[in-house]
Image (cartoon, rainbow, N blue to C red):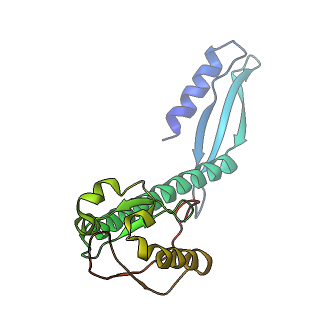
Amino acid sequence: ESRPKVLAMLRDAATNTTPERPWRQVNHPAPGGADVPVLYSAIQVGRQGRVVAVGRDLRAVSTLQQRLVDAQQALERDYLRLRQTEARYRLLFETVTEAVLMVDATAQSVVEANPAAQRLFGDAAKRLVGRPFLDALDTGSRTAAATLLAAVRSNGRGDDVPVRLPGNPDELVLSASLFRQDSGT
């Protein structure tokens, strides 16, 4: 593949009198390994048609380019895995039969509610996202829920607590788990 480049370089050196010479990459076969890339420029010297070619070894550049390509491919693989993980999470979140709320640990506001939580909270679910989580509970359950959230924030876990929703006499069990996403919990 490099022979036409070399012939063109020699032809240009014989006919071109300008000091600007085009550089051409030529790959030299190496025994037992990858080709050695060299960047050449040639100039004719003297009247007998002799040509001097000056070359620059590009192995270091080639190695850096290959590392860049490898890093880009690894990044693309990681991004694909992340998208697949997010899709699995979304599918699990949407199809689980238990009510799941995502609550911002600092603001204690509801970030997201799955369909089961929306069914559990009924009409109040429409106003749930973005609102304080404790406001969604019966006033008698708020202290226990706040204690659970504080324990989970400080220890990473806490004991389940019984709670009630406003206007509903049924007792529910509230569990909480801490997880980190980006820079938030």
Question: Does residue 59 appear left or right of residue 79 in this picture?
Answer: right
Q: Position of residue 113 (x, y in %)?
A: 34, 63
Question: Does residue 184 appear left or right of residue 135 in this picture?
Answer: right
Residue depicted at 63% across the width and 53% down the height:
63
Q: Nearer the viewer, residue 151 or 143?
A: 143
Q: Position of residue 49 (x, y in %)?
A: 69, 21
Q: Is residue 29 visible?
A: no
Q: Position of residue 107 (x, y in %)?
A: 54, 59
Residue depicted at 66% across the width and 34% down the height:
40
Q: Nearer the viewer, residue 49 or 107?
A: 107
Question: Does residue 66 appear left or right of residue 117 in this picture?
Answer: right
Q: Is residue 19 visible?
A: yes
Q: Nearer the viewer, residue 135 or 57?
A: 135
Q: Position of residue 165 (x, y in %)?
A: 32, 72
Q: Quadrant of the C terminus?
A: bottom right
The quarter of the picture where residue 9 lies is top right
Name the residue furthest top. Answer: 17
The quarter of the picture where residue 132 lies is bottom left
Residue depicted at 56% across the width and 61% down the height:
184
Q: Compared to 2, does 43 lie above or below?
A: above
Q: What number of labels is visible?
A: 0
Residue depicted at 42% across the width and 76% down the height:
141
Q: Compared to 150, does 30 lie above or below?
A: above
Name the residue furthest bottom. Answer: 159
Q: Compared to 143, does 35 lie above or below?
A: above
